[in-house]
Image (tube, rainbow, N blue to C red):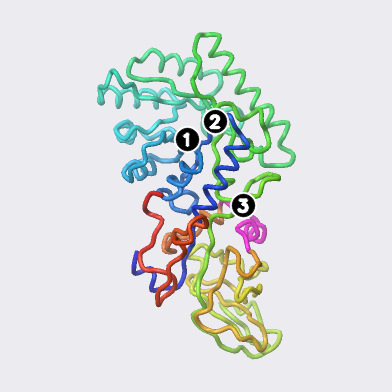
Amino acid sequence: MAEAWLRPVWAEIDLGALRRNVGRICRKVAPALVCAVVKADAYGHGAVAVAGAAIKGGAHWLAVAMVEEGLELRKSGISSPILLLSEPDPDAMDEAVAYDLIPTLYTHEGLNSIRRAARARSLPNAPTVVQLKVDTGMHRVGADPKEVLSLAQAVEDERLLALGGLWTHLAVADEPSGEPFTKEQIQRFQAVVDDLKSHGIVPPMLHVANSAGALAYPGSRYGMVRCGIAMYGYPPVPVQERFEPVMALKARVSYVHEVPAGEGVSYGLRWRAPVTTLVAVVPAGYADGVARKLGMTGGSVLIAGKRRPLAGTVTMDQIVVDCGAGSSVSRGEEVVLIGTQAGEQITAEEWAVKLDTISYEVLCGIGPRVPRVIVDSDDPSRAAPRTRACCGGSAHAGTPE
């Protein structure tokens, strides 16, 4: 990663903020356990460092989307339970079992695959734990409620497998009009739970709630909640608690020059200087996750504690910022694209509104060529390092907390 520091662009990941967010969630949902969702490289924050911080913050479980993501955590030394949120491909089941990941199942094909993998492992005194997912109305993945009993019975009948849990996913818990359907999903889930119980099957872990469910629907909490976006500082529903954004995206001005009144800037010349003005070039673009149209939908950055509007189309590697007539902005000054500077703040949610998307996509979109720098607001010794290029040489969110 050292080469990346030759370009002054970086993302600061505040593990102190993340731990505090997890703690807030834990207190809110107790006695339910918290499962920290760290798929997609922890929504772009760095899965290994975030997983370690989440566990220290009070989370008991972790969840990922793919076997590869689980292997990364295991190889880093993380031993907490790791749930695979989707049924693994048959070719990936052996790895899932070998690394003690907990697969989600919702098809008999998946059940047969995990059965083969468990038999190949052949540890009769340590059965492979699986969880079942039921589709209660989102219609993405999950077993039809009518099929859950047969899947559960098949797991119970296989001595090398153990049923560790049953769960579902809420589709509209984060929408103001979503209450009726969310409650219906919870009722459908409970009906499946009751049906299993009537046949003598009681999964030891039940979970329904995502971030929105955990914060807004107490009836969805059951034994565990799966929290992603709230953990990263962006609760998807109104809350009284103060959640803190964990990621800040920063850069430094690489070039400044004056643009005469009436001249156009960037591709398409869609923005023209209303008066002679100073513009600053910042070396971050859409290859780094700064959406191309942000410059034409009111996007801005912070320089010297002031909002400065983007001037024209975002390009692959650079943005241009209108600093205003007579500005004293100079090369090397810190630029905050997402984050706080001198009391002003720009959030991923603000970007999402301007881009007609959601904060999840903004965070996940910060590209891999942007180095992640670990900071910790609880530990001043872990401030962002600084070197001649920008802020550090090899600090990276690739080590456990």
Judge depth for marks 2 and 1 and give the one in front.
1
Name which of mark 1 and mark 3 comes first in the sequence: 1
In terms of secondary structure, where does tag 2 sit? Answer: strand
Q: Residues within 10 Å of mark 1 (few under 14, many from 20)?
A: some
Mark 2 vs mark 1, CA separation in Å: 9 Å
Q: Residues within 10 Å of mark 3 (few under 14, many from 20)?
A: some
Observer-nearest of 49 and 139: 49
The residue shown at (66%, 27%) is 219
Q: Position of residue 226 (x, y in %)?
A: 54, 36
Q: Position of residue 319 (x, y in %)?
A: 55, 74
In the picture of the structure, the residue carrying the numbered disc 2 is: 224
Q: In the rendered view, would you say 371 is above or below 197? A: below
Q: Is residue 283 left or right of residue 181?
A: left
Q: Position of residue 158 (x, y in %)?
A: 35, 15
Q: Is residue 216 left or right of residue 9?
A: right
The residue shown at (71%, 45%) is 240
Mark 1 vs mark 3, CA separation in Å: 27 Å
In the picture of the structure, the residue carrying the numbered disc 3 is: 358
Mark drawn on residue 112: none
Read off the magenta span: 346-360
Q: Are marks 2 and 1 in contact (CB under 8 Å)?
A: yes
In the picture of the structure, the residue carrying the numbered disc 1 is: 60
Based on the picture, tell me whether residue 103 belongs to the magenta stretch. no
Name which of mark 2 and mark 1 comes first in the sequence: 1
Based on the picture, tell me whether residue 348 belongs to the magenta stretch. yes
Disc 2 residue type (three-letter)? Met
Q: Are marks 1 and 3 in contact (CB under 8 Å)?
A: no
